[in-house]
Image: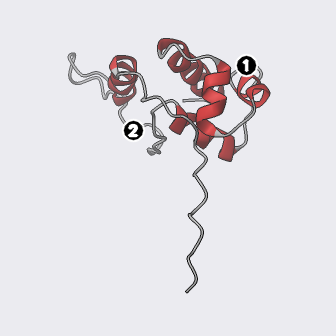
């Protein structure tokens, strides 16, 4: 999967989940502008932003060796892993709503 295919898949996931860029921004701690830029056709998000977006959309990023899941042409019914993964992502339920990724401050410690 190349960079453009990844960004297109993330944008499709956002749309399928019915989320606006603002809602995704709240979930991942980025600005709405950063989300809009990252998911645009010319997007080039930093790794930290990419990981935050993936998490906010209820996905996880996995690495596989190049060529993993390619068909050897011996089994007509074989479908590459990428196809099965893309299908699973498309069928996955929308991610749960978050108020924010920010944590509440710890309660003040009591001194005796």
The residue lying at 51 percent from left, 29 percent from top is 57
* Mark 1 neighbour class, 10 Å CA radius: few under 14, some 14 to 19, many 20 or more: some
Looking at the image, which residue is at 72% across and 28% down? Answer: 38
Relative vertical location of residue 62 with respect to residue 23 in this rendering, above or below: below
Assign the N terminus to one quadrant of the image: top right
Mark found first going from the N terminus, 1 or 2: 1
Up-down relation of residue 19 to residue 43 (above or below): above
Label 2 belongs to which residue? 68
Quadrant of res 62: top left
Q: Badges 1 and 2: C-beta atoms under 8 Å apart?
A: no
Q: Position of residue 75 (x, y in %)?
A: 20, 22
Look at the image and tell me in which quarter the C terminus lies.
Answer: bottom right
Is residue 35 shown above or below 76? below
x and y percentages locating residue 90 in the rendered image = 39, 17
Q: Position of residue 53 (x, y in %)?
A: 60, 34
Quarter of the rendering containing residue 64: top left
Secondary structure beneath dot 1 equals loop
**Residue at x 45% of width, y 33% of height:** 58
Q: Which mark is residue 40?
A: 1
User: For this rendering, which residue is in front, 70 or 10?
Assistant: 10
Q: Tell me the quarter of the picture where residue 79 sits.
A: top left
Judge whether 58 appears above or below 66 on screen: above
Spot occupied by residue 76 in the image (x, y as percentages of width and height): 22, 16
Colour scheme of the picture:
secondary structure
The residue tagged with tag 2: helix, strand or loop?
Answer: loop
From the viewer's perspective, tell me whether residue 2 is left or right of residue 71: right
Q: Which is closer to the viewer, label 1 or label 2? A: 1
Could you give the CA–CA distance between mark 1 and mark 2, rounded to whole angstroms? 28 Å
Relative horizontal placement of residue 112, taking residue 59 as reference (left or right)? right
Residue under the image location 29 percent in, 23 percent down: 73
């Amino acid at each position: 999967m190349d960079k453009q295919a990844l960004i297109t898949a993330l944008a499709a996931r956002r749309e399928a989940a019915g989320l606006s860029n603002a809602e995704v921004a709240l979930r991942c701690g980025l600005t709405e502008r950063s989300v809009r830029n990252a998911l645009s056709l010319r997007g080039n998000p930093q790794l930290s932003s990419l990981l935050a977006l993936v998490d906010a959309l209820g996905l996880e990023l996995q690495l596989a060796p190049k060529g993993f899941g390619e068909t050897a042409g011996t089994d007509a019914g074989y479908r590459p892993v990428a196809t099965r993964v893309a299908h699973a992502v498309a069928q996955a339920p929308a991610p749960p709503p978050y108020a924010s990724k920010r944590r509440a401050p710890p309660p003040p410690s009591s001194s005796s």
